[in-house]
Amino acid sequence: MNIPLPPVLVVDDEKNMRRSLETILSDESYATRVSESAEDALGLLSREEFFMVITDARLGGMSGYDLLKKIHGQKPDLPVLMLTAYATPKLAVEAIKAGAIDYLSKPFEPEELLHAVARCGERYRLLRENAALRSRADQVITLDQIVGESEKIRDLRKLIQTVAQTDARVLILGESGTGKELVAGALHGLSQRRNQNYVRINCAAIPETLLESELFGHERGAFTGAIKQKPGRVEEANGGTIFLDEIADMSRPLQAKLLRFLEDGSFTRVSGTQELRVNVRLFAATNRDIAGAITRGEFREDLFHRLNVVQFNLPPLRERGEDVIVLAEHFLRLFQAALNKDFHGISRPARQKLLSHSWPGNIRELRNAIERALILETTKELQAASLPDFHVESRLQKSQPIQVAPEESLDDALARIERELITNALDQNNSSLTRTAERLKLTRHALRYRMQRLNMGGDIAPTE
């Protein structure tokens, strides 16, 4: 992992010494910033990131020792190298006790200085690598976690494999609960950036006034409570990937700043003046109608085109056919171990009940339904009675255009819709055949005939 180093901050009130140190460091490809006073250095430290500080012990105004103490109090992990022309054992001990990582006497050999700087650079990289490893420990997502055997899901997995190897920006569209975050995680896990940070932000979960600060960071004093400089999540994701979920909830002013960021990776922190730049790959997702949001002026069309290099449209669960059962069995295996129960499968009536529901909450709703059913189930097979009755959930279903699945004929689609309507009516009338027939404006004989034709007699046992 080749993590780039931020600059070294050199603090010395002698101009020639500042130039000399800058030359020594730049010859070894270290970026440097110079300051002639401790006061100026503290200002720089509040606004920028450095991997170490090199300071003279004696400065005009605040001394190097006082600067060391302030740095150690504000940024205890930032190493400081002390330089002095008046070296004594007592001063050396004082510097180390105050938090200096090392102490060099003037004049010194450039190799001595560079050795200390190299140690600090390696320390910075190790700390960043450890932080990155911790942040990725629970984020490894593979294609196997995208469960389903329908044609749409097979095509989705193929597209993920193809797109993951590129650095293309990705826009993921789909209803809530369809697995947008899972797709984003799989794209990162299969990409060339998989060993770098993967940072996720839910734009709808963070107040609008704080989202810009969370994303791009802020300087000290930028707003009430900003007592120190804070790098943004884009800096944390440098070299890796950032995933912006629910991006359509972002305010238009912040959309404009994001648009500029997407051009070349440059940005400024809140209340900052210095332009910073990072190299990140960006994924975005929303469950909203993005075209409608653009028409209403809620989302910038130019930002949409910037994000929409590759578009993923995730199918709702109601359009995935038998994947409902595949997913239910997957969650059955997942939860039975956690609940210490042994199940042999899902009963036929339970399967029919799962297939007849429209799943407005998609995979998330199905997962919750299976977990609830396993908690309530007392037999070795999941029964329909342990599943929710879905009365409230069915009322949540948004009006959707009726669609025929790619592998489905018109007759099959009509039979599926008729079966779903009858099943829902039976559920709403506690399986009473008489009341269900009245609700559907049919005779009991006509309802029985339709159920037999749809092979529903063995799945559902209606009462009189």
Image (cartoon, rainbow, N blue to C red):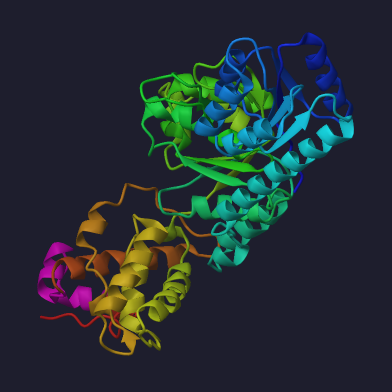
Residue at left offset 13%, top offset 68%: 429
Q: Is residue 23 left or right of residue 52?
A: right
Q: Is residue 396 above or below residue 62?
A: below
Q: Position of residue 116 (x, y in %)?
A: 78, 38
Q: Is residue 381 above or below residue 411?
A: below
Quarter holding residue 113: top right
Residue at left offset 20%, top offset 61%: 391
Using the image as rendered, state which of residue 132 and residue 176 is in the foreground: 132
Residue at left offset 31%, top offset 81%: 349
Quarter holding residue 359: bottom left
Q: Position of residue 460 (x, y in %)?
A: 25, 80
The quadrant of the picture occupied by the C terminus is bottom left
Q: Position of residue 256 (x, y in %)?
A: 53, 20
Q: Is residue 354 above or below residue 231?
A: below
Quarter holding residue 202: top left
Q: Is residue 284 left or right of residue 378?
A: right
Q: Is residue 124 above or below residue 249?
A: below
Q: Is residue 292 magenta?
A: no
Using the image as rendered, state which of residue 374 and residue 416 is in the foreground: 374
Q: Position of residue 63 (x, y in %)?
A: 61, 18
Residue 302 visible in the shown view: no
Q: Is residue 449 magenta?
A: yes
Using the image as rendered, state which of residue 93 and residue 391 is in the foreground: 93
Residue at left offset 80%, top offset 16%: 17
Using the image as rendered, state which of residue 300 and residue 90 is in the foreground: 90
What secondary structure is the magenta-colored segment mainly? helix
Start and end of the magenta stretch?
431-450
Residue 427 visible in the shown view: yes
